[in-house]
Image (cartoon, helix red, strand yellow):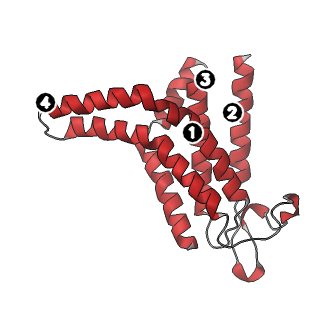
Amino acid sequence: MRLTIAIFLFTCILGLGCFLSGTVTADDRENKKHFGREDRNGFPAIRECDEKGNETAGQIAAWLLAIANLPVTVSIFSRWSNRFTHLRPGFKKILTDLNHFQKKHLMGLHYYLNPVAGVVVLWHWLTSCCRSTALPEWGLLILIIMIGMGIIMKWKLFPKPFQKSIYQIHTQPAIFIVMILVLTIGHGVLD
């Protein structure tokens, strides 16, 4: 049963990735939008294309992602500062204790708020249109893949050998940094 769910989830992630990766060249003069979203009649509540997008959904998504990933950021900062800086042993112990405390009490935010943020991000994407760049869509793709990997790890949907590979990819700080940069630059180009 778990293997069936894992295969289904993996297929959905791949399908979503294929759907999101088919970008088209933006051209303001011909009013084209990314991903063939020219016909917005498929979404009855979204008839108008607001150039600023749904800023409320974007703000909610940004805050949810910030809160959900705060425990991970604190953990990375704590481990890196213990490893690469010359701190007094007492201060290192304080950082280690803080890291253990926040992992015990705050990682629930990471586990459950990120999928909620993913839904809000999809809502934001569906209610927005971008004619100048595809960077926000690439950031969305990375975000959805990372959330999917997190769900796979949390509920152990794949066999152990796959989980180890997924864990190594999901916990790679470079991917998180690239995602933040792509989203920040992409949204900066829009403004």
Mark nearest the camera among 4 and 2 is: 4
Q: Which residue is mark 2?
A: 10
Q: Position of residue 181 (x, y in %)?
A: 46, 58
For the residues labelled 1 and 2, say whether their Cβ atoms are less than 8 Å apart: no
Q: Residues within 10 Å of mark 3 (few under 14, many from 20)?
A: few
Residue 113 placement: quadrant? top right
First of labels 4, 2 by sequence position: 2
Q: CA distance from mark 4 to mark 3?
A: 37 Å
Amino acid type, label 1: Leu
First of labels 3, 2 by sequence position: 2
Q: CA distance from mark 4 to mark 2?
A: 45 Å
Amino acid type, label 3: Trp
Q: CA distance from mark 3 to mark 2?
A: 14 Å
**Secondary element at tag 4:** helix
Figure quadrant of the N terminus: top right
Image point 68% across, 58% down: which residue?
125
Relative to 55, residue 163 above or below: above
